Image: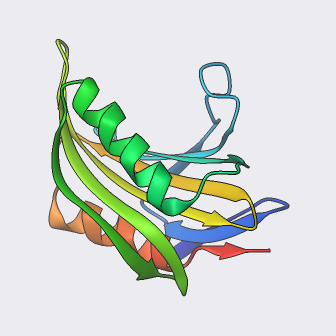
Amino acid sequence: MEMKTFKNNKITFKYPLTWEKEQPNTANNPDCVATITKGEENILNVVMFPTQVNLEDFKVKMEDIITDDGGVIFESDFVSVAGKDAIKLIAEMNTPDIIFEIYTYVFIIDNNIYIFELRTVNPQKEIIDSYISLIESFKIL
């Protein structure tokens, strides 16, 4: 699979040619550094900002936010990916307008948090595999 590279002054990762880099929506989320889409049903946002929280505490916070918003958590684990410790969270969100799944990886390194969140209406194997490859290519510069 041919890949494109996203790179800013802090991070880099690779994503498939079939995905499109969009202008990040910093109006709603000023910490968003990348938005990448595959059609209208798959959107990946990458967020990064300084933090003093650790992975254990942030995992609890993420789970609370999802369940408080009516989401159902399918998986919430500590994992090692791209040579880094991370939180892996998969959940379903049911809003009045749409039902979608969220696939999230969170890294906290040197007091910075990096969140990769894929929202997908139709979680096909190809989409999830592409997302996992993207996560596996994540590097801090």
Q: If the image is split into quadrants, where does the N terminus sit?
A: bottom left
Q: If the image is split into quadrants, where does the C terminus sit?
A: bottom right
Q: Along the horizontal axis of the image, is 90 left or right of 28?
A: left
Q: Along the horizontal axis of the image, is 37 left or right of 49?
A: left
Position of residue 69 relative to residue 124, above or below, is above
Question: Percent from the top left, x then y, of residue 94?
Answer: 15, 26
- Towards the viewer: 123 or 103: 103
Question: Percent from the top left, x then y, of residue 60?
Answer: 37, 48
Q: Along the horizontal axis of the image, is 124 left or right of 127?
A: left
Q: How is the image coloured?
A: rainbow
**Residue 132 falls in image quadrant:** bottom left
Q: Residue at x 70, y 49 (%)?
A: 51
Q: Residue at x 29, y 67 (%)?
A: 77
- Towards the viewer: 94 or 59: 59
Q: Residue at x 36, y 71 (%)?
A: 78
Question: Percent from the top left, x then y, of residue 53?
Answer: 62, 52
